[in-house]
């Protein structure tokens, strides 16, 4: 089991769309993009999500966890909020960070969030290369920022 995994969720359509895609990044080598709207949450992923000894880290992770509970009846344990961690490390005024603003602040890079992809159809049978890229990048960036902290 990974001690820390980075989790992001992409919801189908505008809120309150169902959770469509879950991205998991456990190391530097690969990120998993899971099309959970079609596959559901497999048992081994459920075990990882429920396992309190592995932290799930992300931005607005509590919202994602609520969504997964609502849509998939899986209760995620040990949540770590990257935005809170950023506030602790940076000091100063408490801010509500997004993944994009954190990326700019910490590593001076833009995290493009093109609406064409972000608001695209995440329920399609097969995700496009652009969608996979977008989804994997989100999880990877969370992982990367955590290493920087
Ligand atoms: C949700 O999961 C719990 C066990 O974790 C189970 O007892 C319950 O029946 C499930 N509810 C639904 C609606 O599937």
Image (tube, rainbow, N blue to C red):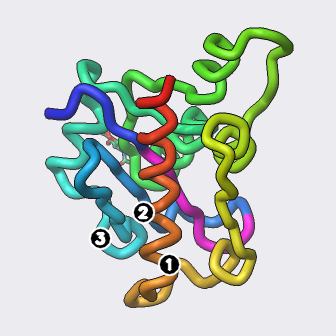
Magenta extent: 7-14
Q: Secondary structure at mark 1?
A: helix
According to the image, label 1 marks what residue?
131
In the displayed structure, does residue 108 sit left or right of residue 46?
A: right
Q: Principal SS element in the magenta part? A: strand
Quadrant where the N terminus sits is: top left
Q: CA distance from mark 3 to mark 2?
A: 18 Å
Q: Residues within 10 Å of mark 2 (few under 14, many from 20)?
A: many
- At x 35% / y 26%, what residue is drawn? 55
Q: Is residue 70 magenta?
A: no
Q: Residues within 10 Å of mark 3 (few under 14, many from 20)?
A: few
Q: CA distance from mark 1 to mark 2?
A: 8 Å
Foreground residue among 115 and 16: 115
> Mark 3 CB in 8 Å range of ligand 1?
no
Foreground residue among 122 and 89: 89
Badge number at residue 103: none
In the displayed structure, does residue 49 sit left or right of residue 128?
A: left
Badge number at residue 136: 2
Badge number at residue 39: 3
Whether label 1 touches label 3, CB < 8 Å = no
Q: Report x, y in % for residue 130.
A: 50, 82
Q: Report x, y in % for residue 85.
A: 58, 19
Q: Mark 1 vs mark 3: which is more N-terminal?
A: 3
Residue 13 location, quadrant: bottom right
Q: Is residue 10 magenta?
A: yes
Closer mark to the observer between disc 1 and disc 3: 1
Foreground residue among 128 and 39: 128
- At x 45% / y 33%, what residue is drawn? 57
Q: Secondary structure at mark 3?
A: helix
Q: Which residue of the protein is positioned furthest toward the right in this rendering?
A: 93
- At x 71% / y 74%, what residue is drawn? 114
- At x 17% / y 50%, what residue is drawn? 43
């Amino acid at each position: 089991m990974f001690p820390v995994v980075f989790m992001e969720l992409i919801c189908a359509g505008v809120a309150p769309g169902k959770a469509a895609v879950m991205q998991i990044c456990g190391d530097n080598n690969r990120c998993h993009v899971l099309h959970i709207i079609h596959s559901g949450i497999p048992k081994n992923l459920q075990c990882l999500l429920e396992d309190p000894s592995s932290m799930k880290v992300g931005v607005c992770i509590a919202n994602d966890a609520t969504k997964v509970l609502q849509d998939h009846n899986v209760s995620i344990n040990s949540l770590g909020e990257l935005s809170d961690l950023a506030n602790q490390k940076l000091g100063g005024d408490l801010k509500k960070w997004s993944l994009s603003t954190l990326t700019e602040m910490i590593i001076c890079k833009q995290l493009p969030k093109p609406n064409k992809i972000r608001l695209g159809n995440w329920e399609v049978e097969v995700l496009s290369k652009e969608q996979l890229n977008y989804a994997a990048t989100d999880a990877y960036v969370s992982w990367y920022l955590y290493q920087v902290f």
